[in-house]
Amino acid sequence: MANKALLSIDDDPQILEIIRKAAVDLGYSAETALTAGKFMTAYSRVHPCVVTVDICMPDTDGIELLRWLGDVGSTARIIILSGAHPSYAEMAQRLGQAGGCRDIAILRKPFRIAELKHALAPVEPGQPTAPNQQAIRTEFGVSH
């Protein structure tokens, strides 16, 4: 990854800080945003290789941001964060892929730091780029 930058949007500042710290631990430069406007402004400045998007936020639906990322031709790996019913995150993933975002993973809230770091880990050549949620849960012994 040439530009190892991460951009994260969530309406919970504590979640953003957890993501920022985990990303910095993995060698990313990390920026966070609480609103869609700040996210879009930061995106054009940072050009991240990884983006985390909370799906359920008060000012903007994360699905709208996935559509926007597709519209701007984003090639970033996208990690959908959601505490909602799993089918909602899966629907968001399919809509994002249909809109042009190819590399989308889902990380269910609440998540463990180890799960987050696994999802953020650089991809080895020949490996899938979007971590499979079930594989992450199996690796870390989570049954739901």
Image: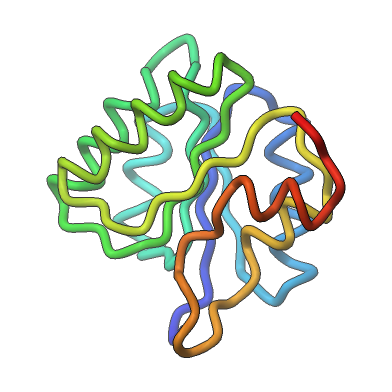
Colouring used for the render: rainbow
In the picture as drawn, the residue positioned furthest to the top comes out as 58
Describe residue 1's horizontal placement relative to residue 23 as left or right.
left
**Whole-percent x and y of residue 33?**
53, 38
**Could you say which is closer to the camera, residue 66 or residue 36?**
66
On screen, residue 90 above or below 46: above
**Whole-percent x and y of residue 99?**
15, 42
Q: How many numbered discs sit on the rendered protein?
A: 0
Residue at position x 65%, y 55% in the image? 135
Describe residue 135's horizontal placement relative to residue 36 as left or right.
right
**Could you say which is closer to the camera, residue 85 or residue 38?**
85
Q: Quadrant of the C terminus?
A: top right
In the picture as drawn, the residue positioned furthest to the right comes out as 141
Residue at position x 31%, y 33% in the image? 65
**Whole-percent x and y of residue 117?**
74, 60
Choose top left, top right, bottom left or bottom right for residue 124. bottom right
**Could you say which is closer to the camera, residue 134 or residue 36?**
134
Residue at position x 79%, y 57% in the image? 139
**Whole-percent x and y of residue 105?**
48, 49
On screen, residue 41 above or below 63: below
Choose top left, top right, bottom left or bottom right for residue 103. bottom left
On screen, residue 95 above or below 41: above
Residue at position x 55%, y 54% in the image? 132
